[in-house]
Image: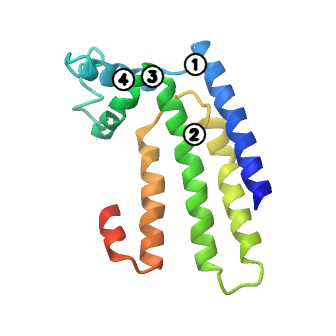
Amino acid sequence: MIANYILFAILFIIIALTGYYKYINGQFTSDGMHYYSSVRNFIQFKTVYDAPLFSYLLGNHAYLTIYLWAPLIKVFNTPVVFLVTNILTHFLSAFMIYNISLFIFKDYKRSQLISVLFMWFYILNRNIIWSYYPGIFLFQPDFLMIPMALLGLYAALANKPKTLQFCL
């Protein structure tokens, strides 16, 4: 199990450095920068105006949860906060997948191995590793739903109604 944590840490460092390299070289689309500018304007007591349109606040991208990152943006004053959040969201999701698999396969002799495999299948999924870790988006608030949905699944399986209500 220690080897998994070491591999997780190495993979996280590689992905974070790749993402930072892409950030300093301007290889991200405007999505993450719109979120950053909207939160930064909110912190500076300006409007939440982020672009020529209010599309990221009032339009089809109504992500009010990005304002929860305002304290971190205030402290670090960089969009890299969103990059790290994006990466951590996927790692947290993998950890949740591991725990759910352990719970489901608890009666099997090799439940630990099965759970670790499911976790690594998620982490190394081609769509996630090439598109969303240090991908072109910098940050997608949609991904915050993944660990929340997995927590809801775990709560349903473990019969924890208060946690399930929180997730819903």
Q: Position of residue 154 (x, y in %)?
A: 48, 70
Write the residue at 69% across / 68% down. 115
User: Mark 2 is on which residue type?
Assistant: Ile
Mark closest to the chain's N terminus, 1 or 3: 1
Query: Does the rendering let one see residue 45?
Result: yes
Mark closest to the chain's N terminus, 4 or 1: 1
From the viewer's side, name the closer residue of 70 and 117. 70
In the rendered image, the residue lying farthest to the bottom is 107
Secondary element under disc 2, as helix, strand or loop, is: helix
Q: Are marks 2 and 3 in contact (CB under 8 Å)?
A: no
User: Mark 4 is on which residue type?
Assistant: Lys
Q: How would you rate the neighbour count of disc 1 (Cα within 10 Å): few for under 14, some for 14-19, many for 20 or more?
A: some
Q: Is 7 situated left or right of 102 in this image?
A: right
User: Mark 3 is on which residue type?
Assistant: Phe
Q: Do the residues labelled 3 and 4 touch (CB within 8 Å)?
A: yes
Instruction: Identify the residue position indicated by label 4 in the image.
Output: 74
Q: Is 167 situated left or right of 92 in this image?
A: left
From the viewer's side, name the closer residue of 62 and 2. 2
Q: Do the residues labelled 1 and 2 touch (CB within 8 Å)?
A: no
Q: Which of marks 4 and 1 is in front?
A: 4
What number is the disc on residue 23? Answer: 1
Q: Which of marks 1 and 3 is in front?
A: 3
What number is the disc on residue 76? Answer: 3
What number is the disc on residue 87? Answer: 2
Is residue 37 shown above or below 104? above
Q: Where is residue 42 in the image (x, y as percent from the top left)?
A: 25, 23
Write the residue at 20% across / 18% down. 45
Secondary element under disc 4, as helix, strand or loop, is: helix
Mark closest to the chain's N terminus, 2 or 3: 3
Write the residue at 57% across / 70% down. 100
